[in-house]
Amino acid sequence: MTIVKSIVTLISIGAVFIAGCGSSAMPLDKLTDAKSTVRAAQEAGAKETPQAQLHLKMANDELASVQKAIDDNDNDRARLLLNQAQADADLSLALARGSADKKSAQDAQAKVVDLSKQAQ
């Protein structure tokens, strides 16, 4: 019975060790997602809106810091910076899209005013 308990204990310790190592690994899919969001913000015109441009720069700076933390094997810091980069990239994208939508709405409103004047 003690051999069985020893085996169960060793398996349990191994499972905890594997789970612990697995949780500290850097999630590369999240890094790819953050980089994709940065590209989407750039394509949406983030550089033309001051606030979107600021958050885009912050996201790019944080992504550079993420890479440095990964190179230094500091996965906890990399994960934290990655979350910040994703948040800044998301905000930049939303601001860029909002600015583009606002401009489209203003253009449409100007056309309506012009058409109203022509109809009179």
Image (tube, rainbow, N blue to C red):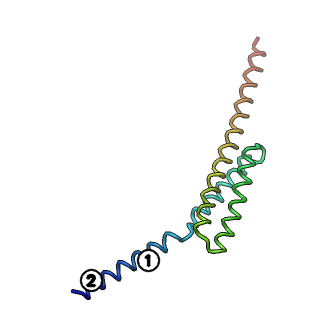
Query: Residue 67: x percent and y percent?
Result: 67, 68
- Residue 25: x percent and y percent? 54, 71
Q: Residue furthest bottom?
A: 3
For the residue pair 110 and 33, the one nearer the viewer reads as 33
- For the residue marked with disc 2, what is the amino acid? Lys
Residue lying farthest to the top in this orientation: 120
- For this orientation, the residue located farthest to the front is 2
Q: Earlier in the sequence, mark 1 or mark 2?
A: 2
Residue 31 occupies which quadrant of the picture?
Answer: bottom right
**Residue located 62% across and 55% down the image:** 86
User: In terms of image quadrants, where is residue 69?
Assistant: bottom right
Instruction: Measure the C-alpha gap from mark 1 to mark 2.
Output: 18 Å
Quadrant where the image shows the C terminus: top right
Q: Residue at x 60, y 57 (%)?
A: 83
Nearer to us in this view, 32 or 9: 9
Crowding at dot 2, Cα within 10 Å, few <14 / some 14-19 / many 20+, comes out as: few
Q: Which mark, residue 93? A: none
Mark linked to residue 5: 2
Q: Amino acid at mark 1?
A: Phe
The residue closer to the viewer here, 99 or 80, is 80
Q: Quadrant of the N terminus?
A: bottom left
The circle drawn on residue 17 is: 1
